């Protein structure tokens, strides 16, 4: 038994891809009207799901996708208008099918109750929908009848003959089969010998070839079949079994199958097709022990003819969308090419991670080698030139390999953006607002992990904009704006970061209301002189919500802080700017990748720490005049017009033998989420790429440390958790601020 | 053992067909659509081709037509494996020169048995 269950996962993944194609296709149709290539894509996706689901025995899924396909088929053939109602129904069905895939994946194949409802509604639409041309409604609603073109009585006759043959199963029948291939039969790869072999498996077969049509040798075309055959088959087979053998050549030959003997009840003779009678009548089987019934048979007396008509004139209605498809050809080729760019590889993320780890090790080896090279060059500079060259090459190769491998994890952000056309469409209907969604920079590539974790925060932000930011058409008209609000999702690379923005042209944030709320929550004091930016960003504080009415669309004040936490977890930050009446702009900044980062090595006493380069603003030598100390022992440094707290790493981590004289060391100014702090270190060392190894998994969580990495000389260095240190610092600052509020600094 | 070219745009289908055929001791090459299949068929020799109908770029029926134009595929068995069961589509397939028609869902054992009949 061949077990196909190992392909379930591939199938489910494919289902989700197909469903996404269907969904975005349907949404496109909704906006842009009928596009045959688009409908074809949607149809194909439904069709693939149906076929594979049936093969796996997921009958509910294949049944449901079949009925969706039927509706799509009518749209594809132009038998049904592509209009809102049908698209809505199909979109609902896509959701339902997705639910079915999910539950099937979880091991539950019972269809959800909504399936029956949707099936009913689609069937209703199929039976009586507007736009459905009368020509073929009944046909498309049910499975296509197999014997489409055959005259009705003949089908009946053939069937009843078959039944009677079945009823005498076990007894012997003798069939005469006239098989006259058309000239092109061989060109379909059908080999008469194959057919005869199969027939011989059913019973006793006698084959007589009619060679009378073979022309003279000089005019013979070797590719044409000139032979015809007269077969006699004896045994307890039914007509159906014989027809099955000839199934593939139906329409490419003249075929008549007659029961010449057998214990049949008398029956009306059915219409017979012309049979080429140029051969001698059949003779009963010879040397084999002849079947009893056959021996009794007198050919003429009980001659029973029911012939299966062949639909040789089959080229009747080819109502396929070929011309339309051809017209759209160029565009189709372009779009599939584009789709191919990101659709070709599927790698298990664990394998990729392992690979990236290996490359990380390679990077370490490389930096170790360069160090050796440097040490040795002091001894003998000439002989080691080549070693140095080799190392340079190794470095270049390592870089390239690393970049290539990291690319495997990169996916276009469209994977995260794709859900929004649907979401915005549904939500704007619900809210009674008119909103146009603009997507830009969809091809911007993002690390897969980042991409996956980005989805929920983005949904939050979009919902927030739609619910609180963008106004209803009436309000917009009243304030002189276009009735249609614009919501833009954009993505771009900026330096080593990815910048994603959610921009709306709605009412903007209400500065006063936020401030009021913040004061009432005790987040800020009423006397604080806060910049607009600072106030707007208060909405990311836990428990902050200014919506007067809590709707089921955006959350209950748990939204924005969750957004910020998620983004921070990814090593990024989120800020908001806004202008009253003009709209607001939420900016998310994320690191390009989480796997390998550039780090600055710093020395404190005998310890080496690493500060990720992305968080360093600058490193400065301390001028004594700019140092300040405030009560409560908190040290401050005046950096241009700003005071920043100073954190001595030696004190934070209890490192002995460190420099204590501020002027003898260096101040590394780091930034996170708009706040700055100066880290006091003994000295700066080199820069190096670091592969972050988690401390939690190898040891345990340590405050102020985000992980560890291995240096070129093989020693372990700890990576500073800048955000953590800043938070700690802010907390300490706050408690001091409470004691000495006059001295608080921004 | 025969070498077979299997064409389907659905990757799960492709993998299942490949798995089934390999279980039957055949050598399998895969193509994502008709266009790709045609390219592969031009430079490789197969004992049999089995193809889906509904595919992007080039569908199965056009593929059969194209293959029949190639000298090496004039008389080769070319089977169509599809969910399309309509008589009309079947006739289109036959006119294009398809050897036979297998309707999905396929049963692995039956598929192998059918292929064995066609392959000498």
Image (spheres, helix red, strand yellow):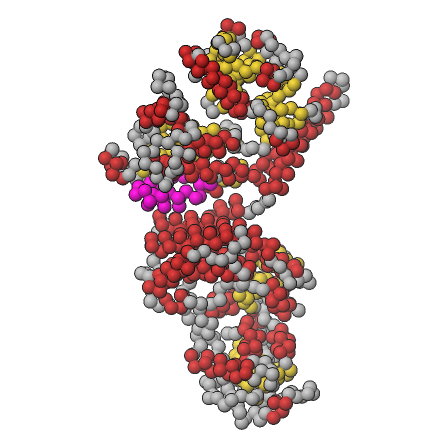
Foreground residue among A547 and A125: A547
- Residue A355 within the segment the image draws in magenta: no
Q: Is residue A645 above or below residue B3?
A: above
Residue A600, image x and y in percent? 59, 22
- Residue stretch in magenta: A416-443
Q: Is residue A9 above or below residue A739?
A: below
Residue B118, image x and y in percent? 62, 69
Quarter of the image for residue A555 reads top left
Q: How many marks?
A: 0
Quarter containing the C terminus of chain B: bottom right
Residue A659, image x and y in percent? 62, 11
Quarter containing the N terminus of chain B: bottom right
Quarter of the image for residue A286 reads bottom right
The residue under the point 52% across, 36% down is A450
The residue under the point 33% across, 64% down is A128
Query: Could one spot residue A526 in this view of the protein?
Result: yes
Foreground residue among A503 and A720: A720
Drawn side of residue A574 relative to residue A688, left or right: left
Foreground residue among A276 and A73: A73
The residue under the point 68% across, 61% down is B25
- Residue A423 within the segment the image draws in magenta: yes
The residue under the point 50% across, 15% down is A645
Residue A413, image x and y in percent? 48, 39
């Amino acid at each position: 038994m061949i077990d196909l269950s190992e392909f379930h996962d591939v199938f489910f993944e494919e289902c989700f891809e197909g469903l996404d194609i269907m969904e975005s296709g349907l949404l496109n149709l909704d906006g842009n009207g009928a596009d045959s290539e688009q409908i074809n894509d949607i149809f194909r996706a439904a069709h693939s799901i149906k076929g594979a689901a049936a093969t796996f025995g997921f009958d509910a899924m294949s049944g449901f996708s079949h009925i969706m396909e039927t509706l799509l088929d009518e749209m594809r053939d132009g038998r049904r208008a592509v209009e809102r109602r049908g698209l809505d129904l199909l979109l609902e069905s896509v959701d339902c099918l997705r639910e079915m895939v999910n539950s099937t994946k979880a091991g539950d194949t019972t269809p959800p109750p909504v399936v029956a409802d949707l099936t009913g509604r689609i069937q209703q639409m199929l039976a009586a929908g507007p736009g459905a041309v009368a020509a073929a409604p009944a046909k498309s609603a049910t499975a296509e009848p197999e014997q489409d073109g055959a005259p009705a009585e003949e089908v009946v006759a053939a069937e009843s003959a078959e039944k009677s043959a079945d009823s005498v199963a076990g007894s012997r029948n003798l069939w005469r089969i006239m098989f006259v291939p058309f000239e092109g039969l061989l060109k379909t790869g059908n080999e008469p010998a194959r057919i005869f072999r199969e027939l011989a498996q059913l019973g006793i077969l006698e084959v007589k070839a009619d060679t009378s049509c073979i022309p003279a040798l000089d005019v013979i075309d070797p590719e044409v079949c000139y032979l015809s055959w007269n077969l006699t088959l004896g045994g307890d087979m039914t007509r159906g079994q014989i027809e099955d053998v000839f199934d593939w050549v139906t329409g490419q030959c003249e075929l008549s199958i007659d029961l010449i003997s057998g214990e049949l009840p008398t029956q009306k003779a059915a219409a017979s097709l012309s049979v080429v009678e140029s051969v001698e009548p059949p003779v009963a089987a010879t040397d084999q022990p002849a079947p009893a019934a056959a021996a009794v048979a007198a050919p003429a007396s009980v001659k029973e003819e029911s012939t299966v008509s062949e639909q040789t004139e089959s080229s009747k209605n080819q109502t396929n969308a070929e011309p339309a498809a051809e017209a759209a050809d160029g565009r189709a080729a372009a779009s599939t090419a584009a789709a191919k760019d990101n659709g070709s590889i599927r790698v298990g993320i664990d394998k990729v991670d392992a690979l990236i780890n290996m490359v990380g090790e390679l990077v370490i080896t490389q930096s170790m080698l360069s160090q050796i090279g440097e040490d040795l060059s002091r001894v003998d500079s000439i002989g080691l030139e080549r070693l140095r060259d080799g190392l340079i090459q190794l470095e270049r190769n390592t870089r390239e390999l690393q970049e290539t491998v990291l690319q495997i994890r990169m996916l276009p952000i469209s994977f995260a953006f794709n859900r929004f056309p649907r979401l915005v469409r549904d939500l704007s209907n619900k809210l009674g607002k008119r909103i146009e969604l603009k997507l830009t920079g969809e091809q911007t590539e993002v690390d897969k992990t980042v991409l996956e974790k980005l989805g929920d925060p983005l949904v939050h932000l979009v919902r927030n904009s739609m619910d609180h930011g963008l106004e209803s058409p009436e309000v917009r008209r009243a304030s002189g704006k276009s009735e249609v609000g614009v919501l833009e999702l954009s993505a771009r690379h900026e330096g080593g970061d990815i910048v994603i923005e959610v921009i709306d042209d709605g009412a903007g944030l209400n500065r006063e209301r936020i401030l009021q709320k913040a004061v009432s929550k005790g987040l800020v004091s009423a006397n604080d002189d806060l910049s607009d930016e600072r106030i707007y960003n208060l909405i990311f504080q836990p428990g902050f919500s200014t919506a007067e009415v809590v709707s089921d669309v955006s959350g209950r004040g748990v939204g924005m802080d969750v957004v910020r936490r998620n983004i921070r977890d990814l090593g990024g930050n989120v800020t908001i700017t806004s202008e009253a009446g003009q709209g607001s702009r939420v900016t998310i900044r994320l690191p390009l990748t989480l796997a390998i980062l550039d780090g600055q090595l710093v020395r404190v006493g005998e310890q080496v720490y690493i500060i990720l380069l992305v968080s360093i603003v600058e490193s400065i030598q301390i001028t004594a005049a700019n140092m300040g100390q405030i009560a409560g022992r908190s040290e401050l440094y005046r950096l241009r017009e700003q005071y920043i707290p100073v954190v001595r790493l030696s004190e934070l981590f209890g490192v002995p033998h460190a420099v204590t004289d501020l002027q003898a060391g260096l101040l590394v100014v780091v930034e996170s989420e708009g706040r700055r702090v100066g880290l006091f270190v003994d000295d700066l060392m080199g820069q190096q790429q670091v592969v972050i190894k988690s401390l939690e998994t190898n040891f345990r969580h340590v405050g102020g440390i985000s992980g560890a990495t291995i240096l070129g000389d093989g020693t372990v260095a700890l990576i500073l958790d800048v955000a953590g240190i800043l938070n700690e610092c802010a907390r300490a600052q706050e408690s001091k601020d409470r004691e000495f509020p006059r001295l608080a600094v921004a | 053992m025969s070498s077979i070219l299997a064409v389907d745009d659905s990757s799960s289908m492709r993998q299942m067909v490949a798995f089934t055929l390999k279980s039957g001791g055949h050598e399998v090459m895969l193509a994502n659509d008709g266009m790709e299949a045609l390219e592969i068929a031009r430079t490789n020799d197969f004992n049999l081709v089995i193809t889906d109908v509904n595919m992007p770029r080039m569908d199965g029926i056009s593929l059969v037509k194209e293959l029949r134009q190639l000298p090496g595929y004039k008389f080769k068995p070319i089977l169509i494996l599809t969910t399309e069961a309509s008589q009309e589509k079947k006739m289109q397939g036959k006119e294009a020169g398809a050897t036979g028609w297998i309707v999905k869902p396929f049963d692995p054992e039956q598929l192998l048995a059918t292929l064995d009949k066609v392959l000498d």
